[in-house]
Amino acid sequence: MHRSGLDVLLATERQLLHGKRIGLVTHAAAVDRSLRSSIEAIGSIPGVRLMSIFGPEHGLHGQAQDLIGVGDDEALGLEKQIQTRVVSLYGKTFESLKPTPNQLDGLDYLIIDLQDVGSRYYTFQATMKYCLEVALPLGLSVIVLDRPNPIGGLQVEGPVVHANYESFVGVHPIAVRHGLTIGELATLYYRDLLQRHQGKQIGELRVIPCQGWSRRMYFDDCELPWVMPSPNMPTLDTAIVYPGQCLLEGTNLSEGRGTTRPFEICGAPWIDAMKLARAMQAMDLPGVVFRPVWFRPTFQKHAGVDCSGVQIHVVDRKRFTPVRTSVALLIAMRNQDPSRFAWRTETYEFVSDPIAIDLLFGSSQERLAIEQGASWQEIAKDWESQEEDFAAMSREGWLY
């Protein structure tokens, strides 16, 4: 039997919440095996008083596009229906990303139930970390309901965040593909908080683990329902390529938003699709095939304009290295027309400097190397020690 942390809570741990005042950080993808939302499921436990509900980026219902601030009124009538307050943790300012002490006042537990996708830039685990940083020093205990890492827990890939490059897409020095569940990340963040608050009493963290998940499993091995955690994460296939393809957000290349296959499709109006596909195939990258495509995004970059590029078809998940693959692809697309390629310079996740690509990589090293003509192999070589160090450290937090 495969169970999420929510399912385990409902089956064996519900007495923990009897008579308690609860705050819940959640979203549309946090469902039980029968597709009940965590709000409905936890709210139905006898004696539970659901006092506050907090929604992350994309909104409580997952309807908002990336980088779009969400107001507290986005609950669409939910607040009246369940007679509790709803708070957005992704508004129009950086300060909105964290709950305030007043918003947590009077709670017995803060419960966090969010579906992560195994990539450092995916912001739900950042929201969790910010909640821990506010709640625990107040003495408020936090319960994290764990969920599977959809892309498995054995592979670690990509650089970690360096000092002075922290942001909402890099809240901690973890690798891009971190190989951890959101509950395991919580244990790492809790350990860090304990070190920072030496000698001071803070609240307790409890992680309720999944049942039946092992590190070799992808989400489709889990017999659990997939619900889109965000508008541009429609399938597991999207999550598998996302650790690399999200890097295109830091450029003027389309990462496929505004199409039915976001992140799997990418390109730009000036790209020669056939030439790009041949170049990528010639690299013989493991576990992947590139097919030339033509597409017209309906929104965001190049909306309404015909673009060409490639679609990434992963044919061997175990061999596929998404971050290395996308760096090779980014370089190949940039090389087709460096005069038309550009790094994104607009404010990104509330930060204007460093620029987006540096926030995504976690430093300026990769951008500078690309500008100086480095190959993807040379860039990836510099990651190896970071990957090894993070993999060794992260095993201390393994729950499975």
Image (cartoon, grey):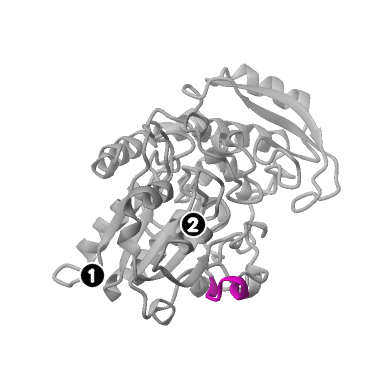
Place residue 156 in its image quadrant.
top left
Residue 142 percent location from the top left of the image: 33, 63
Q: Nearer the viewer, residue 51 or 262?
A: 51
Q: Residue at 62% x, 56% y: name it.
A: 62
- Quadrant where the image shows the C terminus: top left
Q: If you read the primary sequence from the N terminus, does the residue marked by circle 2 or circle 1 appear first?
A: 2
Dot 2 corresponds to which residue? 41
Q: Residue at 50% x, 48% y: name it.
A: 32
Q: Residue furthest left?
A: 199
Q: Residue at 55% x, 52% y: name it.
A: 36
- The magenta region covers 79-87
On the picture, is 264 further left or further right than 299?
left
Mark 2 and 1 residues: CB-CB less than 8 Å, in contact?
no
Camera-near label (2 vs 1) is 2
Amino acid type, label 2? Ala
Q: Nearer the viewer, residue 88 or 24?
A: 24
Dot label at residue 202: 1
Mark 1 residue element: loop
Does residue 162 appear in this view? no
Residue 375 percent location from the top left of the image: 53, 30
